[in-house]
Amino acid sequence: MYEISRLGPVFGAEVHGMDLGSELSGEQFAFVREALITHEVLKLKDQNITAEQQLAFGRRFGKLLVSPFSPNADEAPELIVLDTHRHGRKPLTDIWHSDETYRPEPPFVTILRACIVPELGGDTMFASMRAAYERLSDRMKTLISGLTAYHDFGRFDQLFSGDADRRKMLHEVELALPHPNHPVVRLHPETGRKVLFVNRHFTTRINELPDDEGRAILEFLLGRTGVAETQLRVSWEPNTVVLWDNRSVQHYAPYDYYPQRRRMERVTVAGAAPLADIESCSVAVPRMEVEGVPDQPPGLPEPASSPARPFERQGSGR
Ligand code: SIN
């Protein structure tokens, strides 16, 4: 019989007595899905499953995504393999993020399984962005309601630096996945609760505010992942599986275990375009008018247009 116990006062739970290697009955799967929506992060220990079984479990939630950036298995592109060791590259996951928000339709659930864990370190940290939103003052909630933010590839850009062929590859990924705007506050599609939806990895600016105000507000909002009361730290043993709902949490993988080896295998399930808390609002940026400063003297000609930039002239024959 399966059971559930909570991992923290705010979110997170552990499911006991469930074998993800067996074909879950409709009732068992509904239990896991419901528990995930309620608790946001689920941990299941002792899941000695194959990659095929992990992929099959992921497909119960929906379509699996193939990351354009993360290393994956030759035989199954949907399986991300994060194998970190002394001779490999540093992983790019030690930054707060919700997975793949550079997509117009960012993922719903991620399923991560530990294959090899370091003796010390290598936990994963989570922050509930539903709880983070709920702790904001009413004034701040009003200010950020209806804003949208721009998301790009963040650190993944680094993977393409250095040579023209690589930049061309990046351009092709950009054409396939144009950088999206997402609501700063999203409505969770199943609970209807409001969630703060900006993250340090992929969110670069708030669209409706002047640069300086937008940067300050964005920095404040990004810092909400650091509030200890709305965090959860999950430790791993080989064959621990953790699932999280990217629509309500962010995560951070501390890179504190070098030079020990840590190997994780991940499956990511597609989601839908985030719903905004209210219709997006455009906030007019005020022009600076200073009292007493004269208008231009009468008689000076009014230019009809501004000087062109070189790329604007291209194709005009000039
Ligand atoms: C990830 O960011 O998807 C990986 C998290 C981890 O390795 O703990």
Image: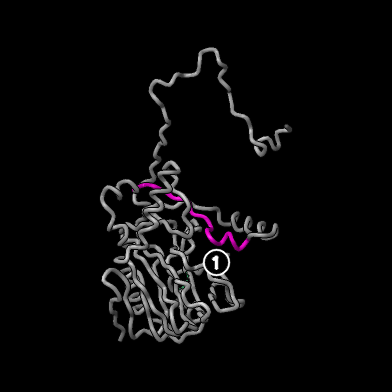
Q: Residue furthest right?
A: 317
Q: Residue sitting at 43 percent across and 58 percent down?
A: 199
User: Is 149 one of the magenta-colored residues?
Assistant: yes
Determine the residue positioned at 59% across, 55% down: 174
The C terminus: image quadrant: top right
Give the image location of residue 234, x and y in percent: 38, 76
Q: Quadrant of the N terminus?
A: bottom left
Which corner quadrant of the image does residue 15 belong to? bottom left
Q: How packed is label 1: few (under 14 Cα within 10 Å), some, or many (20 or more)? A: some
Q: Front-most of 10 and 121?
A: 121
**Colour scheme in the image?**
one colour
Mark 1 CB in 8 Å range of ligand 1?
no
- In x, y percent, where is residue 171? 63, 55
Residue 79 visible in the picture: no
Q: Position of residue 64 (x, y in %)?
A: 50, 69
Q: Amino acid type of disc 1?
A: Ser
Q: Which residue is mark 1?
A: 67
Q: Nearer the viewer, residue 189 or 87?
A: 87
* Closer to us: 56 or 204: 204
Q: Element at badge 1?
A: loop
- Residue 124 falls in image quadrant: bottom left
Magenta segment = 145-160
Q: Is 136 on the left-hand or right-hand side of 225?
A: left
Residue in the picture at 50% in, 15% down: 297
Relative to residue 138, is residue 163 depicted above or below? below
